[in-house]
Image (cartoon, rainbow, N blue to C red):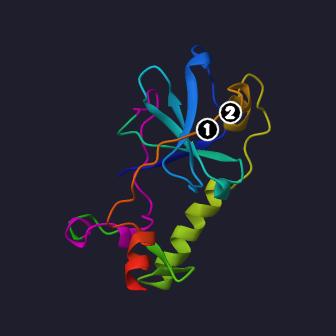
Amino acid sequence: MYLVYFDNLLDVRRGKEQIAFNRLRDGALSTNMIAACCKTLLCVEHPRYEGQSVLLFPDFCPISGLEPLPAASRVHIRDWPAEAYAKLPSLPGTWREDGRLHAETEEDKVAVARNTEAVRAKMSQDASGFLTFQQLLRAAGGQVDTLHLPEGAQSRSIKASLAE
């Protein structure tokens, strides 16, 4: 799945009252911003982004006016089915196991770390006219619903619990 990160500066022109928030399950760190009317996933915030970026899934919510950049790296690659991952073009990739970051090569780890740092880079200082994810969440009363969705069989936490 293709992911794109943008500065946490959102231009909400209309429909602010239709913005809602949810998490996939109890204890999830990611918070989703959705359109309440149709449940379209707009963007995602995670504490690791340090308030500087939001994540978008162009497959769910196409981005207009911008040409997408080519994928630079992959994360959580051990959560992917091996046969599907093997068919993809080669890119640096990492996974977490035993609380540590792993990669096939040190170069892969460095490349993914560089991309991760870009997600946490300070936003543009000119934020006039824009709203942040956090401001929109506060404007919605801070309400975050939990969907109580089960984790997929390939998830890191499911695999870890089976290995115990």
- Please report contact status of discs 2 and 1: CB closer than 8 Å, yes or no: yes
Q: Which residue is mark 2?
A: 137
What residue is rendered at 62% in x and 21% in y?
12
Q: Residue 90 location, x and y as percent?
A: 31, 69
Image quadrant where one finds the C terminus: bottom left
- Sequence-first disc among 2 and 1: 2
Looking at numbered disc 2 in the image, what kind of residue is underneath it? Leu
Q: Which mark is residue 68?
A: none
- Is residue 5 visible in this depiction of the protein? yes
x, y (%) of residue 160? 43, 78
Residue appearing at x 44%, y 84% in the figure: 105
Find residue 29 and report its image quarter.
bottom right
The answer to if 74 sits in the magenta stretch is yes
Residue 138 x/y as whole percent: 74, 31
> Residue tagged by mark 1?
144
* Residue 148 vertical placement versus 161 (above, below): above
Left or right of 27 on screen, residue 65: left
Which residues fall within the magenta stretch?
A: 61-85
Q: How many other residues sit within 10 Å of disc 1, few (<14), some (14-19) or many (≥20)?
A: some
